[in-house]
């Protein structure tokens, strides 16, 4: 990071989840991997795959993987809202 007004950026690949009847998280049917990015006002820290984060519209997403993102390319991706302390096992369909 070169300039003082820059912040760390990273691409977050994830799929939307919903809470099942037993309170556990399940991937919504037909979901495909979607990219988001860490934004300037993102709350919390990346822990790793399986972590649940919220979109700007408060939809829950399970983190599948991360990738580096150049600061200058950050506007190519939708910013996410905040990280939570919740986790789940990465679904087998999305494990590498």
Image (tube, rainbow, N blue to C red):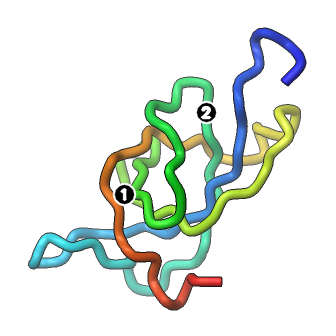
Q: Secondary structure at mark 1?
A: strand
Q: Secondary structure at mark 2?
A: loop
Q: Are marks 2 and 1 in contact (CB under 8 Å)?
A: no
User: Which residue is at 60% across, 73% downward?
Assistant: 33
Relative to residue 40, is residue 46 depicted above or below? below
User: Which residue is at 62% across, 52% downward?
Assistant: 36
Quadrant location of the N terminus in the rendered image? top right
Relative to residue 67, is residue 95 depicted above or below? below
Q: Left of 53 or right of it: where is 96?
A: right
Check the image and name the residue furthest to the bottom: 93
Picture coordinates of residue 8, whole percent (x, y): 71, 31
How packed mark 2 is, by other alpha carbons closer than 10 Å (few <14, some 14-19, many 20 or more), is some
Residue 36 badge: none
Picture coordinates of residue 84, whole percent (x, y): 35, 46
User: Which residue is at 39% across, 76% downward?
Assistant: 89
Counting labels gives 2
Q: Quadrant of residue 28?
A: bottom left
Q: Quadrant of residue 34?
A: bottom right
User: Which residue is at 71% across, 24% downward?
Assistant: 7
CA distance for labels 2 and 1: 16 Å
Check the image and name the residue furthest to the left: 22
Picture coordinates of residue 91, whole percent (x, y): 45, 83
Picture coordinates of residue 26, whole percent (x, y): 31, 78
How packed mark 1 is, by other alpha carbons closer than 10 Å (few <14, some 14-19, many 20 or more), is many
N-terminal-most mark, 2 or 1: 2
Q: Left of 60 or right of it: where is 8?
A: right
Residue 39 badge: 2
Q: Which residue has dot 1 on it? A: 60
Check the image and name the residue furthest to the front: 47
């Amino acid at each position: 990071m070169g300039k003082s007004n820059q912040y760390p950026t990273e691409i977050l690949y994830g799929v939307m989840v919903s809470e099942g009847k037993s309170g556990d998280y399940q991937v919504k049917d037909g979901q495909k991997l979607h990219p988001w990015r860490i934004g300037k006002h993102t709350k919390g820290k990346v822990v790793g795959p399986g972590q649940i984060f919220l979109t700007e519209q408060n939809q829950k997403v399970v983190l599948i993987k991360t990738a580096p993102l150049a600061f200058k390319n950050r506007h190519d991706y939708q910013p996410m809202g905040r990280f939570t302390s919740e986790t789940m096992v990465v679904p087998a369909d999305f494990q590498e």
